[in-house]
Image (cartoon, rainbow, N blue to C red):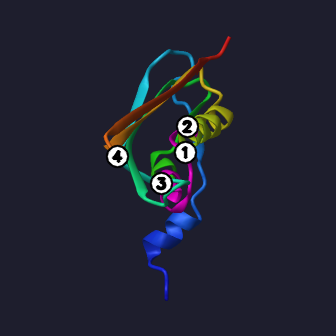
């Protein structure tokens, strides 16, 4: 089966950083990704979440199209809620080296269980 252009773009996606146009100023960037999916490592059922990213940039900011495509790479991966949230956090922290970063993964209830995972850190 031939892959469609969107599937190819997602498969090849890499996070990309841009220069911060205002590195001398503190300002908050908030990003919401409301259609996040991954797979439960135990059952294989899909897990759906809203991913919220907020950060105070330093020298770099994340390019939004690269972030969107990169987050879509999780849709066929078997990961726990905790692993997903920490992997997203680590990738953004390492790429951007922001002044502060917070990643919240708010997973939709499944089996009457609602999970919210938050990872945050501020640079000293």
The answer to the question of whether label 4 and label 2 lie on touching residues, with beta carbons closer than 8 A, is no
Residue at the (56%, 56%) spot, across then down: 78
The first of marks 4 and 2 along the sequence is 2
The first of marks 2 and 3 along the sequence is 3
Which of the 4 quarters of the picture holds residue 109? top left
Which mark is in front, 4 or 1? 4
Viewer-closest of 3 and 17: 3
The answer to the question of whether label 1 and label 2 lie on touching residues, with beta carbons closer than 8 A, is yes
Q: Is residue 14 left or right of residue 113?
A: right
Q: Where is mark 3, residue-wise? A: 38
In the rendered view of the protein, which quadrant contains the C terminus? top right
Residue at the (51%, 15%) spot, across then down: 25
Which of the 4 quarters of the picture holds residue 23? top right
Residue 32, given in percent of the width and then of the height, sits at 37, 38
Q: Where is mark 4, residue-wise? A: 110
Q: Which residues are magenta?
A: 69-82
Q: Residues within 10 Å of mark 1 (few under 14, many from 20)?
A: some
Q: Where is mark 2, residue-wise? A: 82
Q: CA distance from mark 4 to mark 1?
A: 13 Å
Q: Residues within 10 Å of mark 3 (few under 14, many from 20)?
A: many
Q: Farthest residue toward the front?
A: 111
Q: Is residue 5 left or right of residue 85?
A: left
Q: Where is mark 1, residue-wise? A: 80
């Amino acid at each position: 089966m031939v892959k469609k252009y969107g599937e190819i773009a997602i498969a090849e996606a890499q996070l990309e950083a841009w220069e911060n146009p205002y590195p001398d100023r503190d300002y908050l960037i908030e990003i919401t990704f409301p259609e996040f999916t991954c797979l439960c490592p135990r059952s294989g059922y899909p897990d759906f979440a809203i991913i919220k990213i907020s950060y105070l940039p330093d020298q770099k900011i994340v390019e939004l199209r690269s972030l969107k495509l990169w987050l879509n790479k999780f849709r066929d991966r078997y990961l726990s809620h905790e692993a997903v949230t920490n992997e997203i956090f680590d990738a953004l922290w390492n790429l951007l080296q922001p002044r502060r970063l917070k990643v919240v993964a708010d997973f939709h209830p499944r089996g009457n269980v609602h999970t919210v995972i938050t990872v945050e850190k501020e640079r000293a």
